[in-house]
Amino acid sequence: MRIDIITVHPELMESPFRHSILKRAQDKGLVEVNLINLRDYALNKHRTTDDYAFGGGAGMVMMIEPIALCIETLKSKNNYEEVIYMSPDGVLLDQPLANKLSLCGNMIILCGHYKGVDERVREHFITREVSIGDYVLSGGELGAAVLCDAVIRLIPGVLNDETSALSDSFQDNLIAPPVYSRPAEFRGWKVPDILLSGHEKNIEKWKYEQSIKRTKERRPNLLKGNNLK
């Protein structure tokens, strides 16, 4: 997979891709992440990428010209299944969407900033708008990092144990069950006996029941998709 991230602040994006799972995915050659500085596509010597909004109002708007030039340049060299714009009014990122995007070969992610991008960018270049929550950030960079993390970890071979991603929360519209590790007892707090029993069938049943219980308590809206009560 190739992911090209367009941003006016590439330095904000560097750290997440230099550590842990995202770094290993790149080292293995399973994903290529490129940080594209939008200012390199500005049309004046001041490297301007924003301007005042027509009609007035506070805040600057990201101009269409640098963005169009950047996206068209990238498209002249590669084929992309998705051109994603990180926006607070986009479709809310969830596990099914992450699963779908993990099947893409290449994608572009455009990070908004200021008051957003010229609407014509959204109308003519963007294939999908994604939000990571109902709140506003200073820019789309952190949201893009979250999206990349959610997607890249699903690519086969990225995780050492490929079954790990399949048991994550939300994969089956259920929150993951409680997990425990050594020691089996700490300050009198004990790991449930069932997890120490070695009885795989009973353990899986317990995990499923715990997932349903936790989902009912914390995210009951998810159960609608499972027809569980």
Image (spheres, grey):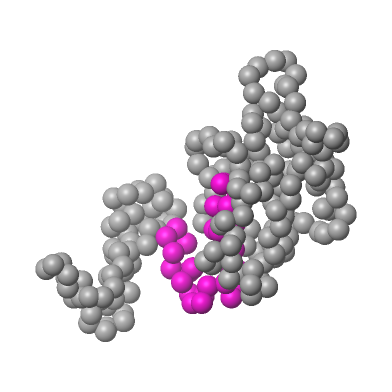
Q: Position of residue 41 (x, y in %)?
A: 82, 42
**Residue depicted at x 52% and y 66%:** 20
Quarter of the image where one finds residue 139: top right
Check the image and name the residue furthest to the left.
188
Quarter of the image where one finds residue 76: bottom right
| Quarter that holds the N terminus | bottom right
How many labels were placed on the picture? 0
Q: Nearer the viewer, residue 225 or 107?
A: 107
Asked whether, in this view, residue 186 is left or right of residue 138, the answer is left
Q: Report if residue 229 is visible in the image.
A: no
The relative height of residue 141 versus residue 23 in the rendered view (above or below) is above
Check the image and name the residue furthest to the bottom.
198
Question: Is residue 206 on the magenta stretch?
Answer: no
**Residue depicted at x 60% and y 48%:** 12
Q: Position of residue 162 (x, y in %)?
A: 51, 75
The relative height of residue 159 versus residue 36 in the rendered view (above or below) is below
**Residue depicted at x 64% and y 49%:** 11
Q: Nearer the viewer, residue 182 or 193?
A: 182
Q: Report if residue 26 is visible in the image.
A: yes
Asked whether, in this view, residue 210 is left or right of residue 184, the answer is right
The relative height of residue 152 versus residue 137 in the rendered view (above or below) is below
Q: Nearer the viewer, residue 173 or 71?
A: 71
Q: Position of residue 3 (x, y in %)?
A: 70, 58
**Residue depicted at x 69% and y 45%:** 7
Which residues fall within the magenta stretch? 142-171
Quarter of the image where one finds residue 112: top right
